């Protein structure tokens, strides 16, 4: 148990070191939003560091590492392309204005190290699943979790692609995206991401004594719903686009469902 604990601590130290490095880069670029690109990559790093340890059942390690790598790399590439040439995200601009000259060092704690700590906690579901030697076979929970995870991944990826194409059309400037998956939920990308983590949890649940890592999908779902996702995003959107209020009234906020203007 002491040896396993050292793996978790080592992964935490690596994550915080990398976040510190990203913070230093952000100082030179005057752009704290580069942390968003590293968010997905950080999980990939943790998954591979854990994979290289001798502990655990190889089949489950390959499964978990493969899924998190697929998810993390796609997300990082998408955010990089989306943000390229647009400067610092408005959220970080607001915090920069709020803290003024202090932001350069305040951001280390409130942005980079905070996200590093959250990243490590959420990634526990992957770390625990990879390090458990039992059962030394794939079970029905592994299969179910993989299906849920892949469905969530596809849902998130398609939603991001639809939004990217919508924003790429100059005719849509200032308009509300309510087509495709966005016609069934106002945040299909967040819903898909949540499913990814619930799927990973089901895979890890196949291992003995791992029920406590439900903290991972619960935490990411809470963040997406109440902190950095739905709540924060919609506060800014309603102010800039009044028609978004009608979209709120007619469309589910998270779990996909038929629009109130439509009949199933």
Image: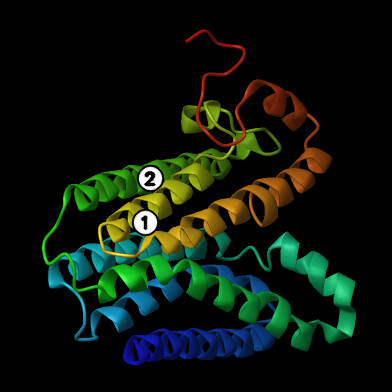
Residue named by callout 2: 152
In the image, which disc is placed on residue 219? none
**Above or below for 152 versus 115:** above
Locate residue 217, reporting x and y percent: 47, 55
Secondary element under disc 2, as helix, strand or loop, is helix
- Badge 2: few (under 14), some or many (20 or more) residues near its Cα, within 10 Å? many
Between 160 and 259, the residue placed more toward the observer is: 259
Q: How far apart, in angstroms, are the residues tagged by discs 2 and 1?
A: 13 Å
Residue 78 appears in the figure: no
| Nearest to viewer (mark 2 / mark 1) | 1
Secondary element under disc 1, as helix, strand or loop, is helix
Q: Residue at x 42, y 91 (%)?
A: 10
- Badge 1: few (under 14), some or many (20 or more) residues near its Cα, within 10 Å? many
Locate residue 46, reporting x and y percent: 38, 78
Q: Residue at x 86, y 71 (%)?
A: 97
Q: Is residue 218 left or right of residue 253?
A: left
């Amino acid at each position: 148990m002491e040896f396993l604990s050292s793996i978790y601590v080592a992964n935490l130290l690596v994550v915080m070191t990398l976040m510190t490095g990203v913070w230093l880069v952000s100082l030179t670029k005057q752009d704290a939003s580069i942390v968003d690109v590293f968010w997905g990559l950080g999980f990939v790093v943790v998954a591979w560091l854990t994979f290289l340890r001798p502990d655990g059942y190889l089949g489950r390690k390959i499964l978990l590492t493969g899924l998190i790598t697929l998810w993390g790399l796609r997300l990082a590439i998408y955010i990089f392309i989306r943000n390229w040439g647009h400067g610092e995200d408005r959220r970080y601009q607001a915090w920069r204005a709020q803290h003024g000259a202090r932001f350069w060092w305040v951001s280390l704690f409130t942005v980079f190290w905070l996200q590093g700590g959250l990243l490590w906690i959420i990634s526990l579901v992957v770390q625990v699943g990879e390090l458990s030697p039992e059962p030394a076979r794939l079970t029905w929970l592994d299969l179910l979790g993989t299906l849920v995870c892949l469905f969530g991944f596809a849902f998130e990826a398609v939603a991001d692609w639809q939004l990217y194409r919508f924003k790429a059309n100059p005719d849509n400037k200032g308009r509300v995206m309510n087509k495709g998956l966005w016609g069934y939920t106002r945040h299909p990308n967040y819903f898909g991401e949540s499913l990814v983590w619930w799927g990973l949890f089901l895979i890890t649940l196949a291992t003995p004594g791992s029920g406590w890592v439900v903290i991972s999908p619960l935490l990411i779902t809470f963040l997406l719903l109440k902190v950095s996702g739905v709540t924060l995003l919609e506060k800014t959107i309603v102010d800039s686009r009044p028609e978004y209020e009608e979209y709120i009234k007619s469309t589910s906020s998270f779990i996909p469902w038929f629009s109130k203007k439509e009949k199933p």
